[in-house]
Amino acid sequence: MLTLKLIQENTEFVIERLAVKNVDARKTIGKIIELDNKRKSVQNQSDNKLAELNKVSQQIGGLIKSGQKEQAEKAKQVTVNLKEEIKQFTQQLADAENELKDVLITLPNLPHSSVPKGKSAENNEVVRTGGPAIFENSNLLPHWELAKKYDIIDFDLGNKITGAGFPVYKGKGAKFQRSLISFFLDEAINAGFREVIPPFMVNEDSGYGTGQLPDKEGQMYHDATDNFYLIPTAEVPVTNIFRDVVVNESDFPVKYTAYSPCFRREAGSYGKDVRGLNRLHQFDKVEIVVIANPKDSYSQLELMVKHVESLVTKLGLPYRILRLCGGDMGFTSALTYDFEVYSEAQKRWLEVSSVSNFETFQANRLKLRYKDDATKKNQLAHTLNGSALALPRIVAALLENNQTSDGIIVPEVLIPYTGFKIIN
């Protein structure tokens, strides 16, 4: 959530930067300033009544001591009336603050100053390694056919048990999936991230804290009885570890990693690009989360990008890294890098990771602060996260790109985890 101070002191700048995300915010920001002025007016009236109450209350004791009982009783009645007025102002203030907050949370984060305006076709490709490649076998099978051929992923069985988008992994397919999770976790731990196993359901406050609510409410599975949400990513519970926390500046950077299943309704998804593992309602992912000092957060972002790059490199996948333009960025992000791997069988790039810096946007919602060593004052921290990695499209690319006439070759780095070299 953007801070009121930023909006008030840099109104035109905020409007201009949000336009980079294709958001016309002038009317909304005008409403925010109007509501904030209303809130301030109510606050001032309440403060004045409170000061008046304190003054009259102090006079009562003196009136009683001097024998002016009648005047003391009148003064007491004045305090009763003032308390009632203050009570009304308190409710008006709460209403004004809630109304203001309801409008504030509709504004997305400002894109970083380096982010240009544009749409997905205008994303900046900063790295490309391999792909498209030339295979001797031009009749490569897509992963959904390979999955059936080797009986490792059963989409029909998942559809029977639950519905489309909930596959069943079987035999070597299940071991392959589990091996990737372990590999990603071990690589994160070796890079200095602390592993946690978070809850896979969160409450409304947690969804709000990281920006999934109310922006993506329609994409989350919701249990109405307990008002819990199935997580769309481990980012949500892991980052909320630090909700209402003051971090010591000396503890930066705080680095966590977590495996979780992820649940997304993916409402509105359709067409050929959703076949097989390309778009699921339940999938596995290893997440990395960093809480950083604002002055160091972009160097931490680059380190996170390098970490994800090392994973796809070790798996031997052709990949590219895109720096997203404003129109393709998420609601909460200030700067995002997307990773895509190339699928030889599908002849297209598959997104497998987003690595983002949210600056203070999530921290403001979370009330996540750190104590500045120089000023001794609490300041908002920066939050970052990335997929390291999401499994479905990684698995799809590995199956498709490593297929041979004898079976699917397992990447060398995974053999210690799988215990086998080929899926056949």
Image: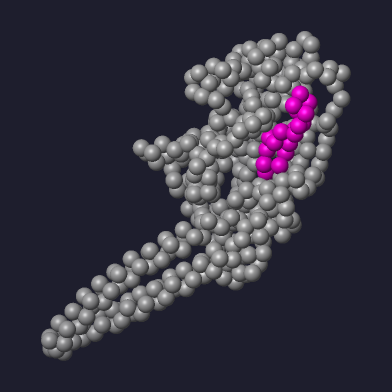
Q: Position of residue 253 (x, y in %)?
A: 64, 49
**Span shown in magenta:** 338-355
State whether residue 26 appears in this view.
Answer: yes
Instruction: Report if residue 348 lies within the magenta region.
Output: yes
Question: Which residue is painted at 15% across and 82% down in the image?
Answer: 73
- Colour scheme of the picture: one colour
* Vertical position of residue 143 compared to residue 132: above or below: above
Question: Which residue is painted at 55% across and 31% down in the image?
Answer: 281
Identity of the residue furthest to the front in this view: 271
Residue 382 versus residue 169: which sits nearer the camera?
169
* Vertical position of residue 170 compared to residue 381: above or below: above
Instruction: Report if residue 179 lies within the magenta region.
Output: no
Question: Which residue is painted at 60% across and 51% down in the image?
Answer: 332
Magenta region, mostly helix, strand or loop? strand
Residue 255 versus residue 392: which sits nearer the camera?
392
Image quadrant where residue 287 sits: top right
Q: Position of residue 31 (x, y in %)?
A: 51, 67
Q: Position of residue 180 (x, y in %)?
A: 66, 25
Q: Position of residue 341 (x, y in %)?
A: 75, 33
Image quadrant where residue 69 sits: bottom left
* Vertical position of residue 422 compared to residue 289: above or below: above
Tell me if 283 is positioned left or right of 406 in this view.
left
Tell me if 78 is positioned left or right of 324 in this view.
left
State whether residue 47 appears in this view.
Answer: no
* Vertical position of residue 301 compared to residue 196: above or below: below
Question: Which residue is painted at 59% across and 62% down in the image?
Answer: 25
Q: Quadrant of the C terminus?
A: top right
Q: How many marks?
A: 0
Residue 176 versus residue 222: which sits nearer the camera?
222
Q: Quadrant of the N terminus?
A: bottom right
